[in-house]
Image (cartoon, helix red, strand yellow):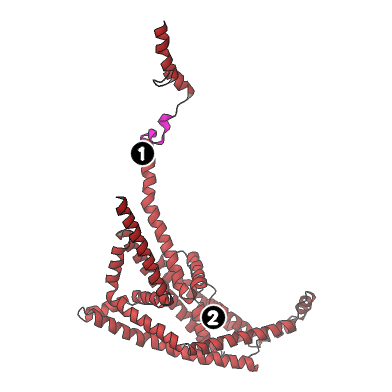
Amino acid sequence: MRIRTLENASFLTLVVLVTLAFLGLLRAFLEPVFWAVVLAILFNPVYKAFHDQLGGRRTLAAVVTLIAIVLLVILPLVGIGMAVTGEAVAVYERVDSGEIDVAAPVEAFERWLPIAGEQLERFNIDFDRVRETLSNTAVTVSQFAASQAISLGQRAVNVLILFVLTLYLLFFFLRDGDRIIEGLIRALPLGDPRERKLFARFAQVSRATVKGTLVVGIVQGTLGGLMFWVLGLGAPVLWGVVMTILSMLPAVGSALVWGPAAVYLIATGSVLKGIILIVVGAGLIGLVDNVLRPLLVGRDTQLPDYLILFSTLGGIVVFGLSGFVIGPIIAGLFITVWEMFIEEFSSLDDNVATAADADPGLLGEGDIGSADDEATRGPTPMSPEAEAVPAEAERG
């Protein structure tokens, strides 16, 4: 028996070590693997539709699904990325040349509120220094954005490799996804019902988070980009994409773009345009976040809004851009695991409580007596007093 236990422990140790070594080999490619899994979950209904129409041919259905993804999703994203790169470089050039004066809001504040300016100077707040700091910050930010856009082009080979790997893995996850899940369920030692529930929760949160975040982001970015174009602000595609990305942050995301833009318009004399941008941003764009996000994300993930907010922020901080999906997934699994724990183990507490009510001796209460009870019962058979009674009788 001891030899069998030692063999099992050694084998389990080997399994853990080999698994960790394999994950270490794949560490550089974990992000493509993750996104391939998420995309397989998202486009699984499309794959199933092609699978049924093509007579159950799994390989052909997976290939057709990949072609549809490339034509309808990837190519438009590539076009938008090229437009964003061009507009980012143009914005940097306009800021660097002084065509866009980022210090205009400070000058307007100083011009409109001279008394407030004098009061702020009493606290050693120099408007010239603030203006210079804002200009330097704007140049630095624009340089960073332009450099990132250029470096993205320079890293095109790496991006292309990761993209091809994602599509390659996506093909197998679409075609063999059901078999892979069944194999994991057989291999994992958590119990099949628990494993199926966890996999279902993973798919539910992934689908709801990506779908809801993308829909909210696309709507907010499109509305914001259109408003920038209508009001004559430069680089509407760039700022629309930035608002789409920032919309991953609930409540405050897109406002980080249209808010400063509205202040800039008012400061440069375009008061009406600034007011229109504030009204549209706070009313229409904000309404999208307040209405669509709870419907598309909160309802489907069955997570409270505050938990979605903190898990999204924490995921982005820890995992980068992919964290807007990983964070809510971890939060959803956290809630699910604890629900399973409470459901399975709270019944044990109920059984113990019921048994204790039926037989208090189970808790040891029947073995506890008072001194009066002992006096009433007399000496126990094994007590020294009981042994002394026969000895006195013999002497008598």
Q: Is residue 226 above or below residue 212?
A: below
Q: Amino acid at mark 2?
A: Val
Residues in magenta, as a range: 358-369
Q: What amino acid is found at the position of numbered circle 1 in the picture?
A: Ala
Q: Is residue 387 left or right of residue 52?
A: right
Q: In terms of depth relative to the viewer, which is nearer, 150 or 243?
A: 150
On residue 355, the disc is 1
Considering only order in the chain, which callout, 2 or 1, is on the residue closer to the N terminus? 2
For the point 41% across and 34% down, the residue is: 364
Q: Secondary structure at mark 1?
A: helix
x and y percentages locating residue 370 in the rendered image: 47, 25
Mark 2, residue position: 280
Q: Residue at x 34, y 74 (%)?
A: 41
Quarter the C terminus occupies: top left
Secondary structure type for disc 2? helix
Magenta residue check for 360: yes
Q: Residue at x 35, y 64 (%)?
A: 15
